[in-house]
Amino acid sequence: MSKRYLATLQFSSTKNYEENLSTLISLIDQTPDRSIVLAPEVCLTDFDYVNFEAASAFSIKALEPLLKLSKDRIIILTIIEKRENAKFYNVAKVLHKQTIIYEKCKNELFTLGQETKYFTAGQDDKALIFEVDGIKLGLLVCFELRFKKYWIDLEGADIILIPARWGKNRTENFRVLSEALAVMNQCFVLATDASNEDCTSMSGIISPFGKALRNGNALCLIHKYDKQELRKMRRYLDVGIK
C-alpha cells in the first residue's frame, strides 16, 4: 500500500469567487495522490451574507472541478448551500473518488459572527465517525470545536477534521483547543483557518502526542500519515480508546 499524506490549506478568500476556486484547485494540485486535504471553512466565498444566493449557486457549481481532483484524494471543505426548504446551511462536504461520500450541516452557529441570522443550524444530536479507505474520520466545523460533547462522540477516530474561519482575537483558543483535542482523543487533528486579516492563520496538523506542525506562511502544509503513531500513543497511555 502506498503512503498516505495529510494536507492543511491556508489562504485568504477574496470577493472574487472564481479567484478563490482557482487558488483552491492550485493548492490541491500541489498535494500528492492519496492525500487527505482540508480547506478552510467557506473558503470559496467567505461569509458573503449580502450575496448568499450567488454564493450558494457558485459553491454548488464549484464542486464539479473539485470532484475531479478527488479521484485519488480525500478533499474536505464547507460551502454555503441553499436547500429545498429555501434555507441556507453551512455544509461540510467530503469528496472522494469523484463522489460526495459524506456531508454534514454545521450544528453550532457562531452568534457573535451573526451566523444565526443568516444560516439554519443542522439538527444532528451527535458528531459521527465515518470510515474512508479504512481510516476513521470525524468532522467538526469551526465553533463546534468548543463543545465537549462532540469530543466524546469522536473518541476512536483516527483523524478529526476541523475546517474553520476562526477570529484572530481568539487565536490562542484555536491553538489550545485543537492541540488538546489531539491529546485527549489520542488522534491526529487537522485544523484549518483562512489567512485573511481577521483570521488566525493557524492551520496545522497535530499528532496524537500533541506535536503541532502549523502552516505558518505556507499555503499548503503536507505531512505523512503514520497510523503507528495512533497505536503507540494508545498503547503507551491506555485510557480506553481503541
Image: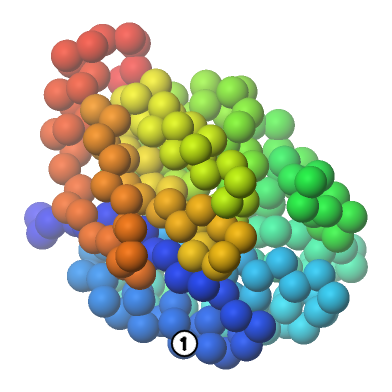
Q: Is residue 117 above or below residue 45?
A: above
Seen at 51% across and 63% down, the residue is 194
142 with respect to 101 (left or right) = right
Does 7 sit left or right of 2 as displayed?
right
Q: Quadrant of the N terminus?
A: bottom left
Q: Is residue 127 visible?
A: no
Q: State the residue at coordinates (44%, 77%).
A: 24
Q: Residue 212 placed where, x, y %?
A: 29, 40
Element assignment for label 1: helix
Front-most of residues 55 and 74: 55
Say which residue appears at 35% left-offset and 74% top-offset: 28
Residue 180 vs 216, above or below: the answer is: above
Residue 228, percent from left and from top:
14, 34
Can you tell which quarter of the image residue 115 is in?
bottom right
Please say which color scheme the image uses: rainbow
Residue 15 placement (x, y as % from top left) = 66, 83
Q: In the image, is 229 to the left or to the right of 110? A: left
Q: Nearer the viewer, residue 121 or 14?
A: 14
Task: Using the rendered image of the protein, determine whether residue 180 is visible from the camera's viewpoint.
Answer: yes
Q: Give the quadrant of residue 131.
A: top left
Of the pair 31 and 112, the residue shown nearer to us: 112
Relative vertical location of residue 123 with respect to residue 8 in this rendering, above or below: above
Q: Residues within 10 Å of mark 1 (few under 14, many from 20)?
A: few
Q: Which amino acid is tagged 1?
A: Ser
Say whether residue 132 is left or right of residue 221.
right
Q: Residue 189: x, y in percent?
A: 37, 41
Q: Residue at x 18, y 26 (%)?
A: 231
Depicted 165 relative to depicted 144: above or below: below
User: Where, quadrant-wise, is the C terminus in this rendering?
Assistant: top left
Q: According to the image, label 1 marks what residue?
A: 22
